[in-house]
Image (spheres, helix red, strand yellow):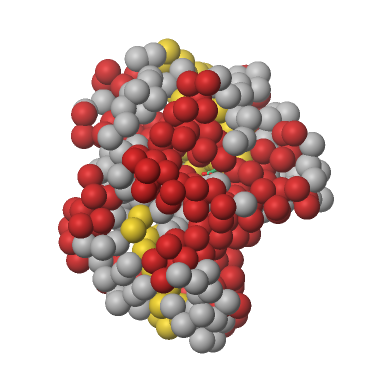
Amino acid sequence: MSTSTVIRPVEDTIPVEDTAAGVFGRSRHLSDRPHEQVVFCEDAATGLRAIIAIHSTVLGPALGGTRFYPYANERQALDDVLRLSRGMTYKAAVSGVHLGGGKAVIIGDPTVHKTEALLAAYGRFVESLGGRYITAADVGTYASDLDVVGRHTAHAVGRTVAAGGSGDSSPLTALGVFQAMRAGVENIWGTTNLEGRVVGVEGLGKVGYSLVGLLAADGARVVVSDVNPAAVERVVSDFPDVRVAGSVVQASLDVYAPCALGGTLSPATAGSLDARLVCGAANNQLTIPEVETMLGERGITWVPDYVANAGGLIQVAGEVDGFDAAVVRSDVEAIFERTAEIFEMSRVLGTGLGPAANRIAEQRIDAA
Ligand SMILES: NC(=O)C1=CN([C@@H]2O[C@H](COP(=O)(O)OP(=O)(O)OC[C@H]3O[C@@H](n4cnc5c(N)ncnc54)[C@H](O)[C@@H]3O)[C@@H](O)[C@H]2O)C=CC1
Ligand SMILES: O=C(O)CCC(=O)C(=O)O
């Protein structure tokens, strides 16, 4: 096991276009703040290559999931983990959670490279940070993986209920997205009901699948797409009324819900998207912050990803504080009110929702 720890300022090495990308609008001071610590982890025996990024511990230990993904190279993995961890700082702050922002990536194909030994080695790296970083699940990782990781560190949440955790956080992430969507729908159409609305869900993994269930139960007309045919088949079999599209982002919609990887909202897609509202689970949906303005000029409202998708964080943060399922669920449902407040703040500021949410998050961190 070998680590190298990069202490700030890691952003000095990153091109401006990378650091500007993501969810951070034009508000610069917190988003410009360098990461506190970035740890490169290698374990030759298991083939583990991972990066753990701690953006901020101002509000508490840095919590964020572990993404297991076949990055083309370490540079791509670093860019992703830096952006994701910074987003977690904002997510915790805007959600009123007493935690900081961190995230980790494991470089590799989870269907090929994920072994118990590799997850164990990863757990030992997390443990070596002494609780400054608390890990959880993300793309390519599951509660059962956290069980393995959690046998080697005290700082893993989102484990299965059988292992003493709160279980898969994706259903509550989906519930939070659904609540944020209802708030968005109310602002546009004057009703919180999704009935009859055409909602496109892109990405039918852990969160997307649960979101389809909530939307179908509320009477939405759901259009879905996923690059993995098995994920599409599962949804079609469980929710026969959904319509499958080649690419949801190109379909004619009322609401677009990106629930796969980030970066699907670029200047190009902002120019072609046929929807009135964007609200989904994917982290870092915008390739550049200016995309929000481009969407706004075409009458499309974007609900900031880190506001809508905080349900999973709220759930696993509950494990840190002492888990109470009813309190956690009600805090996730309150994403409806939080989103409505951000709509109100955006009207006061005369901005999109992105800068308004950033303002709320930054005020909380500044106060701390
Ligand atoms: N799991 C959770 O509780 C949370 C997840 N998120 C974010 O939500 C997103 C989804 O997370 P999970 O559902 O956990 O991941 P997952 O790995 O279970 O599912 C992702 C799905 O997206 C599909 N996909 C990948 N590229 C695609 C593309 N170009 N077009 C259509 N589908 C594509 C994959 O085939 C997979 O089915 C991620 O961005 C994640 O960071 C955010 C907060 C919490
Ligand atoms: O949802 C989780 O389990 C952890 C939180 C997280 O990593 C995220 O919100 O992206």
Question: Would residue 207 be visible to someone looking at this image?
Answer: no
- The image position of residue 111, as x and y in percent, is 51, 54
Q: Is residue 74 left or right of residue 159?
A: left
Count of marks overlaid on the render: 0
Q: Residue 276's quadrant in the figure? A: bottom left
Q: Position of residue 34 (x, y in %)?
A: 38, 19
Quick one: quadrant of the C terminus? Answer: top right
Task: Report the residue at 78% width, 52% height from top.
Answer: 326
The percent coordinates of residue 324 (x first, y second) are: 80, 45
Q: Is residue 225 above or below residue 115?
A: below
| Residue occupying the point 21% across, 62% down | 298
Q: Give residue 223's position: percent from left, percent from top.
A: 42, 77
The quadrant of the rendered image in which ligand 2 is seen is top right
> Looking at the image, which is closer to me, 297 or 169?
297
Q: Is residue 153 visible?
A: yes
Residue drawn at (43%, 62%) of the image = 187
| Quarter that holds the N terminus | top right
Instruction: Classify residue 313 as left or right of residue 53.
Output: right
